[in-house]
Amino acid sequence: MADPKPTGTDLELMQHVDGELDEAADREVELRIGRDPDARAKVDALGEVSELLRGHLELATDAVPARRFDQIWREIDKQLDLAAAPAPAAVPAERAASESVMMVLPAQASLWRRVTHWLDRKRGYVITAMVSAGAVAAIALVARPGGTGAAPVEQAVAHRPAELEALDTPGGTWTMMNVSDEDGAATVIWVTPEDTVEGL
Amino acid sequence: MNRLALAAAIAVASLGGLRSAVADDKADCSFLEFTATKGKEPAIDPDLKPLEKKLAHSAPFASWNTFRVQTKLDKTLQKSKAEALALKTGTANVILRERSAARVNLGITLDGADGKRVLDAKPDFQTGDWFFVGTSTPNAKDDGHFLALMCK
């Protein structure tokens, strides 16, 4: 009955298939494969198994979404941070729970480090929020009533003449006139008393 | 996508704040009571200089050439709070009904020297624009009596 364990020679065949032998040893194995049909069959079989395994691993890798890789890298970074940090002191359970958001870093990590770490993780959100807030602040500064920048904004908005929601002139009739020149617009309500024979 | 939604939420919230900031509950208003007469030489009171072009060339002012300020007032109107204006001829009351960044909505009453109501109006006009109400003077039908106001 043949020994199921790989012999020293079988091990060499495996190393040959995996390209792990040095040049001299590899040459020797190739000579043996040329002479020994059994060794040739073993090498072919090992080659097929390696190819199958490699193909399977490549397919499995393709199936992992890119963000999973991001997560893996973050985990690695986290482990590196933990390894670099001094051993954490005992943290009460309730404190640990309350700091769950910050638990990526050791409990005694400095506040600045925690903040920068959080900013690093939320960089995209923070930049977007800052840009939005800046734009809105600029609009607010320019558009505020009575501010120095009010005029350009109001000029940009289409001018609407005065409108009258209600007008009552008990003692006469009225006429409305809109006046406009380079100094701006104006509206005039002229009331002609009833006892006036001739109006304007 | 989440980032876009967050930015949109911030923008909407900020614009809401902006809207409330400009939708103030007060307005700074200037009031000018003036007479318009026909004289030998044109004359415009220095306080009316900002309105000089309108007074010189536009109806109904072009009917006169002499303009004299009777009363000049600056008031900050608070929303829904009536302000009485002591005029040289008659009285006026004004109330800020609504305002936005660009417009004011006022209630104005104007009573003649005899106490009779001349006008009761609710105009809505652009901030920075002048709004005039005028009538002929009781004793000189050819002369004009105006109240001009402008709010910011």
Image: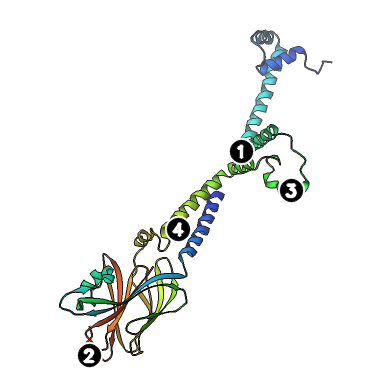
Element marked by disc 4: helix
Is A135 drawn above or below residue B105 in the view shown?
above
Quick one: label 2 or label 4, which is nearer the N terminus?
A: 4
Residue A42 figure quarter: top right
- Location of mark 4 (residue): A140
CA separation in Å, label 3 and label 1: 26 Å
Quick one: label 4 or label 1, which is nearer the N terminus?
A: 1
- Location of mark 2 (residue): A197
Query: Local crowd at mark 4 within 10 Å, few (<14), some, or many (≥20)?
Result: many
In the image: residue A81, left or right of residue B68: right
Query: Local crowd at mark 1 within 10 Å, few (<14), some, or many (≥20)?
Result: few
CA separation in Å, label 4 and label 3: 41 Å
- Please state, as top left, top right, bottom left or bottom right, where the C terminus of chain A lies in the image: bottom left
Element marked by disc 3: helix
Element marked by disc 2: loop
In the image: residue A125, left or right of residue A144: right
Query: Local crowd at mark 3 within 10 Å, few (<14), some, or many (≥20)?
Result: few
